[in-house]
Structure formats: structure tokens, C-alpha cells
Image: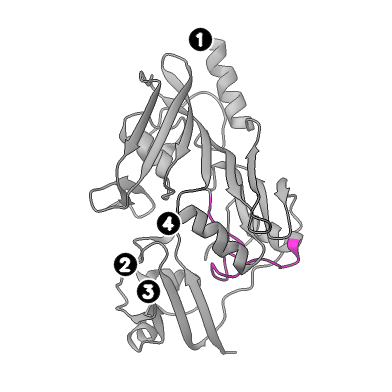
């Protein structure tokens, strides 16, 4: 049965540089590409309230609006999956996402994600600003990156948190263990990041990409490896992984970006989002949250210290 759809999507960094028709084909897998293109050409789909071509390359923060007859996408089912909640008030949550879990469903995977668990925990009371597949999601972490994520319970909270991200007033810090010895105690990588030209699943340093700034501090050296504290000034897709690979110090076990391998079993890249500093939308109070090392960090540090 067809339903009239009034749908809005706000594009995040993960979907930047993807064609508009490709993005919508992933959201609505039961619709043909030609059908999607027809709706775009007839201005039933707009970007930032402007008619565009199907080949339009999406940018972060673009707003897609749809009004047309289409079969609704699959409903994302709540699942009773344990959550590690480290902060909660009436407006938001901060969750410690485990490595190996998708942040939100995709057209290919619709179960066992953080969103499925959040829908169950909140009884569906989440912001809907970010589309049907991403309720509550303000920012994301890669599947194999563990750590802290902010979740908006309503649209006002989403807007307030998103504004902090856009103004770079939220502090996000990460632990990473990288290949090679970084000689400088501190450093900054200021290189633009965009979609890889030939491998769409990857990002890359590219002159036509988006401004991307990563600051790092050395915590411990192991001769052939370095333990880092990383502070993101911007939040591009795969930013830390791309930047560290670019300076020839890829994150340990990050197979997508050419890292060295250690004989330690980890989920993949040894990377953890360990702290957040933000202002809550509820009462405008500032919060600083920090969590302990995850299992991948502990196992890798223990191994490197044992052979040091």
C-alpha cells in the first residue's frame, strides 16, 4: 500500500559527497532508481528547498524534503539490547557504544544496532530530525570504534546539540594506538577530507574536501607504536583514521587504512571515544564525562608493555 510521505532528512558527514538519488535509493530499497530520479526531476524532492538534479552531490547539513507517493521504508523495530548509559536527563542520553555495533540501521542491516536498542529503552521517544533510520542520533561512531555518543530525546534537544557540534564547542577526545613512533609530543593535522575518488567506502585527504583538524598528544611510546590522546576540532567521517594514515601512523589493526597488525585480537581499529564535554539542552548545565579504557585498548597496551 502506498502512503503520502512527508519526509525530511538532514545529511551528516557519513553521507556527504553521495549522489542524491543514490542516498534515497538506499533509504527506500523497494523503489527503483528511475522512480527516485523521476521524483527529483519533478521537484517532489528538494534540497534546502531548492530543486536539484538526481546527480546532486550531498553536503553535510543539507536538508532533503520529500512529498510524494511511495511505499514507506521498513519500520525499525525496538530491541531489548543492553545499553551502557553513562548520562541521562529529560532531554538526552550519553551512551557508551561497544565496538562492533552499528550506530544506526542501514538499508542492508536493520537489527542489532544502537538505534534498535534506544527505541526499546525510550519507548520510541527520540528526535526524528535525522530521518527514519537515525532517530535520536546527533553524531555517530564507526561500527568498530567504541565510546561515547550523545542521543537526543526530542527535536529541540537535537537542534541544541547539533548547534554545539557545528560551532565546535563540544569537546570530543579519543584514545588511539598507532603504528610507528611519533617523535613530537604534540601535533596538529590540518588536512581537508573528502570521499575517496575510487573507493566510496573510504575517505581521503583531498584538496577539495572539507576542513578537518585533528590535535594529538603522546601518552606513551613503545618504540614501534605510540599511544595517543586525540582531540577533534572537526568531526568528519573517519577523520582520525584518515589523518593518522596520512601522516604514516595508521591506527593499529585498521585494515581499511593500511595499518600494521599486532598479534592481539581486537574488533578492528584500536580507537575509543573516551570523553565528552557538552552543555545539556535541558538546563544549560555543562557536563564532562570520561570512561575507562575499553578491552581493545587494555589488551593492546598490555601486549606492548610486555614486549617493551
Foreground label between 4 and 1? 4
Which picture quadrant has residue 56? bottom left
CA gap, disc 3 and disc 2 = 9 Å
Residue bearing the label numbered 4: 13
Q: Which residues are magenta?
A: 122-140
CA gap, disc 1 and disc 2 = 48 Å
Can I make out residue 129 in this image? yes
Secondary structure beneath disc 1?
A: loop
Secondary structure beneath disc 3?
A: helix
CA gap, disc 2 and disc 4 = 12 Å
Secondary structure beneath disc 4?
A: helix
Residue bearing the label numbered 2: 57
Image position, residue 232 (x, y; %): 45, 41
Whichever of callouts 3 and 2 sits on the residue coming sooner in the sequence is 3
> How would you classify the magenta stretch by its main secondary structure?
loop
CA gap, disc 3 and disc 1 = 52 Å
User: From the viewer's perspective, is 216 left or right of 190?
Assistant: right
274 is higher (above) or lower (below) than 283: above
State if disc 1 and disc 4 touch (CB < 8 Å): no
Magenta-span inclusion, residue 135: yes
Which residue occupies 72% across, 52% down?
88
Residue bearing the label numbered 1: 308
User: From the viewer's perspective, is 246 left or right of 293?
Assistant: left
Foreground label between 1 and 2? 2
State if disc 4 and disc 2 touch (CB < 8 Å): no
Residue bearing the label numbered 3: 21
Secondary structure beneath disc 2?
A: loop
Q: Which of these two is toward me, 148 or 281? A: 281
Which residue occupies 56% across, 21% down?
301
Image position, residue 48 (x, y; %): 39, 75
Amino acid at each position: 500500500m502506498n502512503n503520502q510521505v512527508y519526509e525530511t532528512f538532514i545529511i551528516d558527514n557519513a553521507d556527504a559527497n553521495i549522489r542524491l538519488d543514490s542516498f534515497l535509493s538506499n533509504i527506500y530499497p523497494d523503489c527503483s532508481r528511475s522512480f527516485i530520479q523521476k521524483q527529483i526531476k519533478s521537484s517532489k524532492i528538494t534540497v534546502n528547498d531548492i530543486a536539484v538534479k538526481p546527480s546532486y552531490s550531498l553536503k553535510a547539513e543539507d536538508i532533503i524534503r520529500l512529498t510524494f507517493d511511495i511505499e514507506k521504508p521498513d519500520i525499525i523495530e525496538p530491541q531489548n539490547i543492553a545499553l551502557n548509559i553513562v548520562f541521562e536527563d529529560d532531554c538526552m542520553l550519553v551512551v557508551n557504544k561497544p565496538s562492533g555495533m552499528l550506530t544506526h540501521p542501514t538499508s542492508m542491516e536493520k537489527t542489532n544496532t544502537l538505534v534498535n536498542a534506544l527505541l526499546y529503552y525510550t519507548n520510541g521517544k527520540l528526535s526524528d530530525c535525522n530521518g527514519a533510520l537515525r532517530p535520536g542520533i546527533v553524531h555517530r561512531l564507526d561500527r568498530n570504534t567504541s565510546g561515547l555518543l550523545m542521543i537526543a530525546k526530542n527535536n529541540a534537544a537535537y537542534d541544541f546539540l547539533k548547534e554545539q557540534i557545528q560551532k565546535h564547542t563540544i569537546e570530543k577526545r579519543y584514545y588511539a594506538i598507532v603504528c610507528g613512533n611519533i617523535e613530537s609530543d604534540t601535533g596538529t593535522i590540518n588536512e581537508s577530507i573528502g570521499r575517496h575518488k575510487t573507493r566510496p567506502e573510504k575517505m581521503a585527504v583531498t584538496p577539495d574536501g572539507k576542513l578537518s583538524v585533528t590535535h594529538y598528544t603522546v601518552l606513551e611510546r613503545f618504540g614501534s607504536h605510540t599511544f595517543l590522546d586525540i582531540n577533534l576540532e572537526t568531526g568528519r567521517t573517519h577523520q582520525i583514521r584518515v589523518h593518522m594514515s596520512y601522516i604514516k601512523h595508521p591506527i593499529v589493526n585498521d585494515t581499511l587504512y593500511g595499518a600494521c597488525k599486532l598479534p592481539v585480537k581486537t574488533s578492528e581499529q584500536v580507537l575509543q571515544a573516551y570523553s565528552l564535554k557538552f552543555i545539556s539542552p535541558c538546563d544549560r548545565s555543562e557536563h564532562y564525562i570520561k570512561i575507562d579504557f575499553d578491552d581493545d585498548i587494555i589488551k593492546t597496551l598490555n601486549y606492548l608493555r610486555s614486549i617493551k
